[in-house]
Image (cartoon, rainbow, N blue to C red):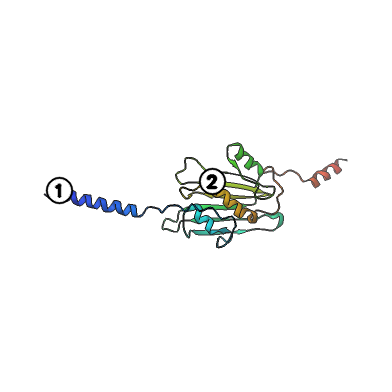
Amino acid sequence: MGRISFSLAFLICALVALGGCQGQEQPPSDLSPMPTVAAPPYICDQIPLRAVELMTGISRPLARGSFDLGEGESGGSGSCAIYKPDGSRGQVMLITLTKSGFRGFIEDRLENGESRLPEIVSGSIGSYFAPSDSEDNEAYAHLVGGNSELIVEMEHGAPGRDNAADVVALMKLIAPKLLSADNTPSASPTASASPTAKRAEKSGEG
């Protein structure tokens, strides 16, 4: 009798635990289209919160970082790290703007099978991809405009969404403002001599 009671108690506990786990399941992802306008509210002063919530499936994420947009040809720099608001504080996305963007790096990515971004900023070149075997719905995008590069790394995307399309949509929202207005392309990490310098060299040779 005692053995039967123990088995019954164990079964009841298992059912209660199962019910608790089911109650903690993630709600279905919001499959609404990404916004087409970078409207407030923002995180890190530049990134539309609504877009990030749709992409990650996380409401009111934590964010840390800022951007210095620079002036003229100097370009901008900065970053925005986005985290889960729960106790884990796990990072779900990182957006980085650097002053060292080179078209050759993007061309290599395209040759290695990544998809080409549209020309979001005049003269820009970019690529994006989403690993087919990712359990976290990752997606990444890189865009070079002028001497600056904008990178979107989504480490945890919302399940059921087109994660690759989401990082492209975010690029369209933020790149026009974050990338430098100077779109003179850089062909490689080692910049070639300027036309003025070349003319000076020729004059010296004569």
Q: Quadrant of the C terminus?
A: top right
Mark 1 is on which residue type?
Ile
Residue drawn at (19%, 52%) of the image:
9
Q: List x then y, in percent, for residue 122.
A: 69, 49
Other residues around mark 2 within 10 Å, as few (<14) / some (14–19) / many (≥20): many
Which comes sooner in the sequence, label 1 or label 2? 1
Per the image, the residue denoted by label 2 is: 164
Dividing the picture into quadrants, the one containing residue 186 is: top right
Tell me the number on the disc at residue 151: none
The amino acid type, in three-letter code, at marker 2 is Ala
Q: What residue is rendered at 67% in x and 50% in y?
A: 121
**SS assignment at label 2:** helix
- Residue that lies at the very extreme toward the bottom in this rendered image: 41
Q: Is residue 191 above or below residue 66?
A: above
In this rendered view, identify the residue nearer to me: 38 or 112.
38
Q: Secondary structure at mark 1?
A: helix
Left or right: residue 198 versus residue 97 is right
Q: Residue furthest front?
A: 32
Other residues around mark 1 within 10 Å, as few (<14) / some (14–19) / many (≥20): few
x and y, in percent, of residue 116 in the image: 61, 42
Image location of residue 81, percent across then percent down: 52, 55
Work out how far the residue at label 1 is from the one at label 2, CA to CA, in angstroms.
Answer: 54 Å
Q: Quadrant of residue 24?
A: bottom left
> In the rendered image, which residue does mark 1 sit on?
4
- Left or right placement of residue 55 versus residue 87 in this view: right
Q: Residue furthest left?
A: 1
